[in-house]
Amino acid sequence: MFTDILEGLRLNYLGVLAGGLVAAVCAYIGVYIVLKRIVFVGASLAQISSAGIALAFLLGQSVPGIAGYPLAVSLVVTLIGVLIYSQQSLSRRIPQESIIGIGYVIASALTLLLIVRSPKGMDEVKELLDGNIITVQQSDLMIMVSVFAVVMLLHLLCYKQFLFVSFDPEMAATQGYRTRAWELLFYLALGITIALAIQYAGLLSVFAYMVIPSVTGLLLARRMPTAFLIAIFSAVLSTLLGFCWALHSDLPTSPPTIAIAGSILGLVWLSRRFVREP
Amino acid sequence: MSSLVVFEHVNLGYGRRRVLTGIDFDVQSGDFLGIVGPNGAGKTTLLKAILGLLKPMSGTVRRSMENLWIGYVPQRESIDTFFPLTVLDIVLMGRYARLGPFRQPGKADREAAFRALEHVGIADLAHSPYARLSGGQKQRSLIARALAGEPNLLILDEPTNGMDLVSERAIMELVRRLHEEDRITVLMVSHLLNVVVNYAKRLAILCEGSLREGAVSEMITRESLSALYGVEVQVAQVDHRLVVLPGANGAEKDRPLPVSGEGSL
């Protein structure tokens, strides 16, 4: 059995690398998402990104060139979502969570409406949800490495700014930080990450990577760098074990990966409940 | 004495709603100014304008020194304890404005942070998680963060809110020491009149959309406070400390005077 699984991983090594990469980047950004209490912004942007992919499929029927670039269409649609969510003038009249909820349900309904008209129909819905990261090509992996490298470089260079503006925006503003500009930059990086990750890993996995390993990291860590490392480790470990399970049982990769990430979180939560810290 | 911040005929508010009208005052170098007023009087609005977070509807807010460094101590309840940060991590944030855009805190910044922690008496807690500190220790951490930036104006927003009497006294003595020994200009906003009057040199009282300011001795009289709050007020001295009390008929009114610690006098 183990030999078969290892052989499966070897044959699909590009997918394993891509899965690990998506898991690591989403888990890193997820720490901020959980801390900033914007988990549903992440979910909503993921859904908007899926609507963008569905739109690309539909437009591709009449304009064949577009069908080859679902990522570009998804990215444009996601960035429009980012700009709408970052408009503070909206949230003065409507509570922010209502705006997020409205964005989420409209994007979900739009995805279904667009996909119903596509020739593949519900198969596409399933693919959007589950993704097909195991089958990525080398060119896809190169795109992911390039884009995620830029996103992570931005996060590493601007760690101080993103942390300060997330933790204490008022104090940051008194120190001369342009908090709205930094927030917008954070959301743009988030939108780009989600749009790219959804394209390959699917809606369920991306949302799960952004929440579950991050909460695991935050439960265990006493400092931010440790929280990032634990979140990344937990996400990558879940991906590897999830892929093994999927290959062994002939399942899509998302559900086993999420089940394992959830189990790790459950174990950590239980250990925190029953083991006293020194 | 030079003025650090000057308000000239300033009207403040949000959208079209005006909260404060015709504000004229300044914060002078070496001053200890207390800004007091009942809840909803516009203390937070004035504070935001001083910090540069709120533009005036009309009038001018001028910062007189080119190198004015403000150390801001927010209400500790506004600090999110879910972030996994140590006391040192938080104090280092006070250095961020002095670093370049992409520079991370270095050895000199750590030394400055430790100096600030020693100054407020919690250097031993540098590596403790902020979330596990007591209310008084959290307040000291936030004061240390403000001091780490080596400010010439320290602004504290309700620093003793919700504290017991012992912690309240300790924090206020620390603020007094920073002002008297380190010659830091202090501006403190509080709704606790009895706390502020015993530490500040000058008092600015916000009431019904306007501001009156002067020396504490001028402002804290039975006549002026009774007129200002619209209820009878008594001013007494107990053990060389000023105590402001609502009079017998003042207590019957709808608007109690919030004057000191733990939600009471």
Image (cartoon, rainbow, N blue to C red):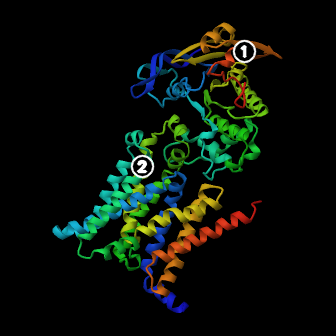
Q: Where does residue B181 sit, x and y in percent of width and height?
A: 73, 24
Image coords of residue B76 (percent x, y): 64, 38
Instruction: Tell me if residue A127 comes above or below residue A186 in the rendering.
Output: below
Q: CA distance from mark 2 to mark 1?
A: 49 Å
- In front of the other: label 2 or label 1? 1
Local packing at callout 2 (Cα closer than 10 Å; few below 14, some 14-19, many 20+) is few
- Describe residue A158's horizontal placement relative to residue A58 as left or right: right
**Which amino acid type corresponds to the residue marked 1 in the rendered image?**
Ala
Number of residues whose C-alpha sits closer than 10 Å to that of mark 1, classed few (under 14), some (14–19) or many (20 or more): few
Q: Can residue A69 be seen here?
A: no
Q: What residue sits 48% from the left and 82% below the top?
A: A246
The x, y position of residue A181, in whole percent, is 41, 43
**Residue at which label 2 appears:** A98
Q: Kindly indicate the quadrant of the structure image that contains residue B165.
A: top right
Give me the chain letter of mark 2.
A
The residue type indicated by label 2 comes to Ser
On screen, residue B9 above or below A179: above
The label number, if any, that marks residue A10 in the structure image: none
Q: Which of the image's four quarters has the N terminus of chain B?
A: top right
Q: Which residue is mark 1?
A: B248
